[in-house]
């Protein structure tokens, strides 16, 4: 099926209109008309080859919200007209010990990314959500609750689940002090979820102008990190720190903010290794950990939680012609708090 999209034709090139064919709807596939696609900083990292060699032409986009337009003969999970979401992967091996636990993002063979990857046939280049039409195996898509607006839901498919999962795993809740580093697309969802779980939430930001927004999202405290004195003043304070910063930072400064047995969870992926002073880890039995998106069952659980608590992303809906400017503004930390492409403009 002919599909309209926006693609990067080479690393660091501006995205431009592009057309390609998607596969026909197989017996276990669903087809969807994309309504909105979020712009994740990972799209920018990959389109600019900040994570290493990439596949071009690249149609980025892994925060996809749309409406089912057709289903294959064996599909049982969806019907035409359903609201449907697609996230960061479209397939996995289905049989390894992680896949069988619903942790497809940690598939031992590697998950099949929504774009910038070959599909499991080994030849088809996966093309992402900056497009008007998508086809996916029903097992790798989720139901979007009726009461939530599609534009606010799209970013939940990556930014939302990527914070929900570590918040659940590290038991962020009542009595816990959690800090969220970076109030961007991921960070603002972290604030909303940690507040909803009942934790005491602090935002660590290098943008003083975001203070009022952070507090309006429910954060209890806001610390501006450009003054080095704040690291001493807030030493040994937090149980969990969720690092969503997309740029290289001195991770050691932030580790010093952890209390005894605290964990700093790395989520932001600038692409270069971090330097850690082992002494900072030893002093307080601190841990540094990582977390990557979430599996399909948890993705559905998160959306249901959002429906119950009326949580969506704060979005700026844009026309497709604005994608390149949106990239520049995202890199400049000038986003409130997720750009979402209106796919009808592609
Ligand atoms: P984003 O919207 O651009 O937010 C990143 C935030 O980091 C910015 O808003 C800014 O917050 C802070 N920041 C940026 N540059 C900084 C600098 N030079 N110094 C200090 N802070 C800075 O990006 P995003 O879409 O949320 O993604 C964040 C990162 O997570 C990216 O690296 C992305 O690739 C990665 N990611 C990881 C996963 C995963 O599964 N682990 C999933 C999705 C994305 P302040 O202005 O508040 O300081
Ligand atoms: Zn993402
Ligand atoms: Zn697997």
Image (cartoon, grey):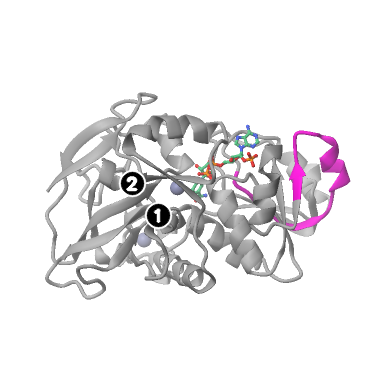
Callout 2 environment at 10 Å: few (<14), some (14 to 19), or many (20+)?
Answer: many
Find disc 2 in the rendering and name its residue.
342
Q: Is residue 237 shown in magenta?
A: yes
Residue 264 in sight = no
Q: Is residue 211 in view?
A: yes
Query: In this picture, is 82 found above or below 227?
Result: below
Q: Is residue 1 left or right of residue 296?
A: left
Q: Which quadrant of the figure has residue 80?
A: bottom left
Rendered location of residue 140, percent (x, y): 31, 62
On screen, residue 210 versus residue 89, left or right, reads right
Residue at the image position 29 percent from the left and 46 percent from the top: 343
Most foreground residue, 31 or 239: 31
* Pointer 1 residue: 151
Write down the region rendered in magenta: 222-244
Q: Going by the picture, which residue comes out furthest to the right? A: 233
SS category of the residue bearing label 1:
helix
> Residue 320, located in which quarter of the rendered image?
top left
Up/down of 90 relative to 343, above or below:
below
Tell whether label 2 touches label 1 (CB within 8 Å): yes
Pointer 1 local density, CA inside 10 Å: few below 14, some 14–19, many at least 20: many
Residue shown at 31%/65% (left/top)?
83
Q: Secondary structure at mark 2?
A: strand
With 36 as the anchor, is 21 left or right in this view?
left
């Amino acid at each position: 099926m002919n599909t309209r999209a926006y693609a990067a034709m080479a690393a660091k090139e501006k995205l431009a209109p592009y057309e390609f064919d998607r596969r026909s709807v197989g017996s276990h596939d669903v087809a969807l008309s994309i309504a909105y696609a979020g712009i994740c900083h990972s799209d920018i990292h990959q389109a600019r080859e900040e994570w290493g060699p990439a596949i071009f032409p690249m149609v980025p986009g892994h925060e996809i919200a749309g409406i089912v337009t057709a289903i294959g003969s064996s599909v049982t999970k969806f019907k035409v007209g359903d609201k449907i979401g697609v996230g960061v992967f479209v397939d996995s091996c289905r049989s390894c010990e992680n896949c069988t636990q619903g942790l497809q993002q940690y598939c031992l063979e590697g998950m099949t990314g929504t774009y910038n990857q070959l599909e499991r046939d080994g030849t088809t280049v996966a093309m992402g959500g900056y497009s008007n039409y998508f086809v996916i195996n029903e097992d790798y898509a989720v139901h979007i609750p009726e009461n939530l607006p599609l534009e606010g839901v799209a970013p939940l498919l990556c930014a939302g689940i990527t914070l929900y999962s570590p918040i659940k795993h590290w038991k962020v809740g009542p009595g816990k002090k959690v800090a969220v580093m970076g109030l961007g697309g991921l960070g603002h969802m972290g604030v909303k979820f940690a507040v909803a779980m009942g934790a005491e939430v602090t935002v660590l930001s290098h943008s003083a102008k975001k203070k009022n927004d952070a507090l309006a999202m429910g954060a209890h405290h806001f610390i501006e990190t450009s003054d080095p004195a704040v690291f001493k003043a807030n030493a040994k304070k937090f149980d969990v720190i969720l690092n969503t910063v997309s740029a290289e930072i001195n991770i050691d400064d932030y580790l010093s903010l952890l209390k005894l047995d605290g964990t700093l969870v790395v989520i932001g992926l600038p692409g270069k290794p971090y330097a850690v002073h082992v002494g900072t880890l030893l002093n307080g039995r601190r841990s540094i950990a990582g977390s990557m998106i979430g599996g399909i069952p948890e993705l559905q659980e998160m959306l249901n939680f959002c429906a119950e608590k009326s949580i969506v992303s704060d979005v700026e809906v844009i026309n497709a012609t604005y994608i390149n400017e949106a990239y520049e503004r995202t890199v400049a930390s000038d986003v409130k708090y997720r750009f979402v492409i209106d796919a009808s403009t592609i």
